[in-house]
Amino acid sequence: MNSPLAVETPRTDYFRAELVTLIPQLRAFARRLGGDIDSAEDVTQETLAKAWRYQHAFRPGTNLRAWLFTICRNEYYSSRRRVWREEPFDQADAESIPSAADQIWSTELSDTLRAVRSLPDTLREALLLVGADGCSYEEAASICHCPVGTAKSRVSRARRALAAILDSPPSGDAAQRLQVSAA
């Protein structure tokens, strides 16, 4: 795809020569606008890029300096409008971002919680009482209104089902595939 700007014409040569002579004045103007040398350089570069891209819009015989300064001024104010949305880099904030290992742990925890929720109510209740709440089998049996052996069995089946769900491929509902009985 050929750009119309790729063809060298006398107009393009003239425009380039005039543009190059005005660069120092353009930089000085950008510095006076913002006061910050780095942002002034950015504004100047963007101004030059826009001027080159839209050189066809410049009318020969008019004031190129005024045209460039208008682009520069508009670019400066546009960049100032964007700045309020940008936040400065804060080393402390950057260090508090979780590492990849922390993010993997979080994903695994989410998967585990989802798997626990997919267990039948009786198995989930027994597992949570013994595993998460720290109840003894006797306490869990009392809370669930069942014999101690049944509580132990439910916890054991819940653990096996949970391991199978977490080890299975992510597609489909693993709890339904296992057809865990809620007895």
Image: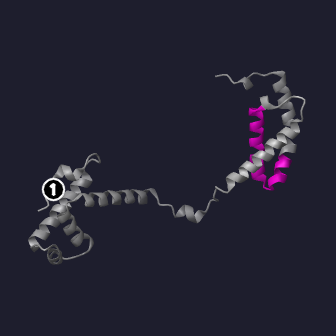
Q: Is residue 66 above or below residue 91?
A: above
Q: Is residue 158 above or below residue 134?
A: above
Judge from the rendering whether residue 37 lies leftward or rightward of residue 147; answer left or right: right
Q: Identify the element where label 1 is drawn.
A: loop
**Residue 44 within the magenta-colored segment of the rendering:** yes
Q: Residues within 10 Å of mark 1 (few under 14, many from 20)?
A: some
Residue 71 in percent (x, y) is at 79, 42
Asked whether 135 or 167 is in front, the reply is 135
Figure coloring? one colour
Number of marks present in the image shown: 1
Residue 88 in percent (x, y) is at 64, 59
Can residue 21 be seen at all in this image of the molecule? no
What is the quadrant of the C terminus in the image? Answer: bottom left
**Residue 34, picture quadrant:** bottom right
Which amino acid type is marked by label 1? Val
Judge from the rendering whether residue 14 lies leftward or rightward of residue 83; answer left or right: right
Residue sitting at 34 percent across and 60 percent down? Answer: 109
**Residue 66 within the magenta-colored segment of the rendering:** no
Question: In terms of secondary structure, what is the magenta stretch mainly?
Answer: helix
Judge from the rendering whether residue 96 lies leftward or rightward of residue 102; answer left or right: right
Residue 10 in percent (x, y) is at 84, 22
Q: Which residues are magenta?
A: 27-54
Q: Is residue 113 above or below residue 20?
A: below
Residue sitting at 72 percent across and 48 percent down? Answer: 78
Residue sitting at 81 percent across and 56 percent down? Answer: 35
Residue 117 in percent (x, y) is at 27, 60
Residue marked by disc 1: 180
Can residue 38 be seen at all in this image of the molecule? yes
Q: Is residue 23 above or below residue 114?
A: above
What is the quadrant of the N terminus in the image? Answer: top right
